[in-house]
Amino acid sequence: MIGPAIRRHRRPRPPVTALVAFGVALCLVAGTGVGLASTEPPPGGPDAPAAARAPATVSRPSAGPGCVGGCPAARPPRGEPTRVRVPRIGLDSPLTVLGLDRAGALVPPTDFDLAGWYGGGPAPGDPGPAVLAGHLDSRHGPAVFARLGELRPGDTVEVRRGGQWLPFRVTGALRTRKDRFPTAAVYGPTPGAELRLITCGGDFDRRRRHYVDNVVVFAVADPPR
């Protein structure tokens, strides 16, 4: 389900169709169970009953000390993000730009060892929730976001953009079933720069060849050190 082309947009926030397609089905691709794309709309969207939208929470995002809602960098970042690193889990990966296929589904990284940034939404460092996505595993072993679920509030995530490292602080995480994905909480507008790091999790459905859950890590911009 990896499309031949990537559509790039320069809009302040992702289109609704992108949010729906991406949110519900990260880590679903026929035959592997480790992909990132689907065309199926989520039953747990904004118009669903509250009970259907409730995620299985691992830890609640919280503002904590420091900047609430995100902080600006020392100088406005420019250009596209090129790299992400997370010291706690030993992650250091170039970033590829992710787009949508004709059905409105996110096109995943073709390399299981690379993380991707959704180019149709905010860039890291700009106001709004920037989306970074990566595979959990492959048939050959752990992939780039294999240890994402180990992150805890206070951990640091850094994104390289415009010749500078932009620091973000993890505020919380959640694990949610794909059919109850909290679209508004993950993709809703924010007053400052934030990150959403997303991969798959939970049990692996061998019959349908995909994981049943998504793992989402929330982070807010910190003042540059």
Image (cartoon, helix red, strand yellow):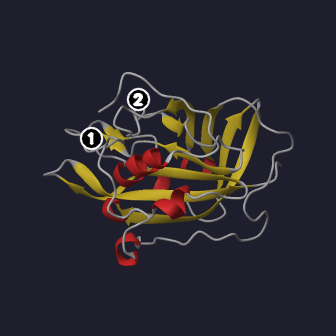
Tally the numbered discs: 2
Residue placed furthest toward the bottom: 51
Which amino acid type corresponds to the residue marked 1 in the rendered image? Val
Q: Position of residue 117 (x, y in %)?
A: 54, 38
Q: Position of residue 143 (x, y in %)?
A: 40, 40
* Residue at (47% x, 65% y) in the render: 174
Query: As displayed, is residue 203 above or below residue 3?
Result: below
- For the N terminus, give its image quadrant: top left
| Horizontal side of residue 155 vs 3, given as left or right | right
Observer able to see residue 115: yes
| Label 2 or label 1, whichever comes before in sequence order | 1
Judge the density around disc 2: few (<14), some (14-19), many (≥20) Cα neighbours within 10 Å: few
Which secondary structure lies at badge 1? Answer: loop
Which secondary structure lies at badge 2? Answer: loop
Judge the density around disc 1: few (<14), some (14-19), many (≥20) Cα neighbours within 10 Å: many
Q: Which mark is residue 192?
A: none
Which residue is identified by label 2? 111
| Horizontal side of residue 222 vs 92, given as left or right | right
**Image quadrant where residue 42 sits:** bottom left
Which amino acid type corresponds to the residue marked 2 in the rendered image? Asp
Q: Which mark is residue 29?
A: 1
* Residue at (79% x, 65% y) in the render: 66
Distance (Cα) linking label 2 and label 1: 14 Å
